[in-house]
Amino acid sequence: MSFSATILTLYPDMFPGPLGMSLSGDALARGVWSLEARNIRDHGLGRHRTVDDTPAGGGPGMVLRCDVLGAAIDDAVPADDPRPKLLMSPRGKPLTQAYVRDLAAGPGVVIVCGRFEGVDERVIEARGLQEVSIGDYVLSGGEMAAMIVLDACVRLLPGVMGKEASGTEESFESNRLEYPHYTRPREWEGRPIPDVLLSGNHAMIERWRREESERITRERRPDLLKTGRD
């Protein structure tokens, strides 16, 4: 069974977007994974297909209605669907490489892309939505965040990347940032490739890469050294 993604959004034409190109696009064309974008507004109310309303208690912005989103989820996701249902949200669980690996190992995902000021809390609780964040900032909606989640998952599916090692020797796979990379020419603008990488001594190369990985992590993301793998 291929990895199946269902997106619930007010802007289904945004998909597949960049997911239709490069590795993810090739895998999509080959049926390694599938993508369906559902329009939440199809379940909107009245002649204007209203999907939002003013926040209870007052305040700025609008809130996506629970009855509308609940109906959209129910129509798109069968009761026995085993896929996790995610809601892209800045208050959600941080997206990590370990979490991405867990998702990629499963049957797929259902992703709800919020808009406006937020989503009625009742539908989050009633439909078991797992809130996920891609970083400590706020976007106009969840669509771009959903694309990031899917790109991170799809590249790990069997047959997507050229070399299996490409998915394991990367930043965050071992709670470290990745070591520097070099290729031809041997020297460029007075900057040579480090001699160790041209030595042919694989043990020395491995040690150099590990030390560089630790150095870069210590300089740029010391927080990663204080925590175990998520």
Image (cartoon, rainbow, N blue to C red):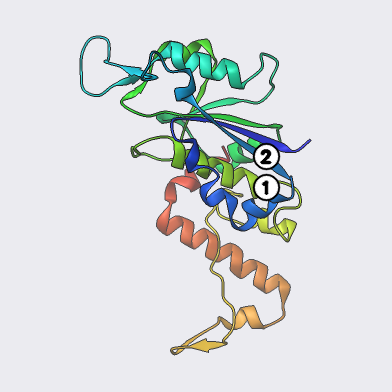
* Residue 94 drawn at (x, y percent): 47, 35
> In front here: 136 or 194?
136
Snapshot quadrant of residue 5: top right
- Count of numbered circles in the view: 2
Q: Is residue 151 above or below residue 35?
A: below
**In what element is the residue under mark 1?**
helix
Q: Residue at x 59, y 78 (%)?
A: 183
In this picture, residue 55 sits left or right of residue 154: left
In this picture, residue 197 sits left or right of residue 59: right
* Residue 218 drawn at (x, y percent): 45, 56
In this picture, residue 149 sits left or right of residue 136: right
Q: Quadrant of the N terminus?
A: top right
Q: Quadrant of the C terminus?
A: top right
Residue type of the residue flagged with mark 1: Leu
Residue receiving disc 1: 28
Q: Earlier in the sequence, mark 2 or mark 1?
A: 1
Q: Measure the C-alpha gap from mark 2 to mark 1.
A: 6 Å
**In what element is the residue under mark 2?**
strand
Q: Is residue 82 above or below residue 134?
A: above
* Residue 201 drawn at (x, y percent): 72, 78
Residue type of the residue flagged with mark 2: Ser
The single residue placed furthest to the left in the displayed view is: 59
Residue 124 in sight here: no
The single residue placed furthest to the front in the displayed view is: 47
Q: Residue at x 72, y 73 (%)?
A: 202
The single residue placed furthest to the right in the displayed view is: 1
Q: Residue at x 48, y 62 (%)?
A: 215
Q: Are marks 2 and 1 in contact (CB under 8 Å)?
A: yes
Residue 186 in sight here: yes
Residue receiving disc 2: 34
